[in-house]
Amino acid sequence: MTLEQTVSAIRPLDEKSMTAAQNRFANIAMPLGGLGLLQDAIVQLAGILGQPVPDISRRAAVVFCADNGVVAEGVTQCGQEVTATVAENMGRGESTVCLMAKPLGMDVFPVDIGVAQPIKSEKVLQFSVRRGTANFAHEPAMTRKEAIEAVEIGIKMAEICAEKGYSLLIGGEMGIGNTTTSAAVTAALTGAEAAAVTGRGAGLSTAGLERKIAVIEAALALHKPDPNDSIDVLHKVGGLDIAGLCGLYLGAAAQRIPVVLDGVISCAAALLAVRLCPQSVHFMVAAHRSDEPASILLLDALGKRPFLTAGMHLGEGTGAAAGVALLDLALAPYREMVSFADIGMEHISRKSSCLSDR
């Protein structure tokens, strides 16, 4: 589907399934609300999938790999060649997210959406829009047409996953310089100062951080991206990986597949998607709060409370993978725990029970 068709296809959650899930939680032998945010997420999953007992056993990670021309401004610790190396590592199943995915039974689909160097791996899906973005310190990162094309590749990946029968997706990214693009996108969308949303990425020095902030400030002043137009923001100061993630989240919502958000880059893409279609936010589950400074701002803008605050900032979808593990843990008692009726306590009052006040 096109971007416009995808946005039009997104519908509200299934209220009946959500009510059934809430009733199930009210009647199983555990404290009311005892699973906290995980319990809320299970109710949300029920509404997305239309299943009172949501089945998320078929899951996949879609990892968009792309390079960013702004690295020419000295905003990173290493060069663009690292993006291709890690993407090829993913193709061999040897990157961090691949290894975390194995015990979760999760398939990983690395996507070359704009790596500067051609990828030498048949297992990396080839959907390159262009060989890296332009340097947004001097010109728009990409054309508006290229931004839409990248978003629609993300939509296509969601459609492919739906055809394969996946019932849960996580989005990941790999691209040197993408904490710079995500900070620029965040500042453009929220109006926050660049210094408030820009972090050190993969260990940038203080001098490097100051240079990174100055580059973002100058780019925003030069291009004046429109915060009410996600495509304008993407094409002026965004990245191809962020565009792909934005499309994945919209496509998953249209296909009624829940998505677990990763860190700051993932959440910047999610906010772009929500600005394009506010209804899409209901299909997103927040896994963790990244160590990058924009993370709290983005999560607040999305209205999301994450499961984890573990100081993670690796990328690739690794924080989202950790969130999937927690969802699995929470679903086990939800599916299998006995009800009060099963143990002969049909008459119990939850308000007066010792199980209600923990």
Image: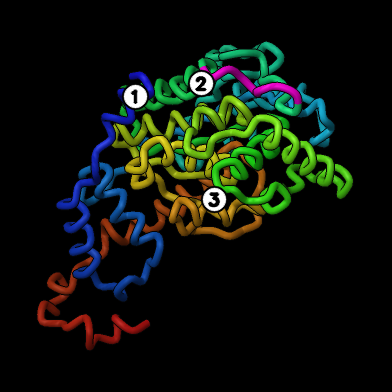
Q: Is residue 206 left or right of residue 303?
A: right
Identity of the residue drawn at 67% across and 36% down = 220
Q: Quadrant of residue 59?
A: top left
Instruction: Write the start and end of the magenta stretch as one range.
Output: 138-144
Relative image position of residue 179 (x, y in whole percent):
68, 39
Residue density around tag 2, few if under 14, some if 14–19, many if 20 or more, within 10 Å: many
| Label 2 element class | helix
Relative image position of residue 232 (x, y in whole percent):
53, 28
Identity of the residue drawn at 82% across and 31% down = 78
Q: In terms of secondary structure, what is the magenta stretch mainly?
A: loop
Q: CA distance from mark 3 to mark 1?
A: 24 Å
The residue that disc 2 covers is 150
What amino acid is at disc 1? Answer: Glu
Q: CA distance from mark 2 to mark 1?
A: 14 Å
What amino acid is at disc 2? Answer: Ala
Q: Nearer the viewer, mark 2 or mark 1?
A: 1
The residue that disc 3 covers is 298
Vertical placement of 225 versus 112: above or below?
below
The residue that disc 1 covers is 4
| Label 3 element class | helix
Q: Earlier in the sequence, mark 2 or mark 3?
A: 2
Front residue of 11/66: it is 11
Q: Quadrant of residue 184?
A: top right
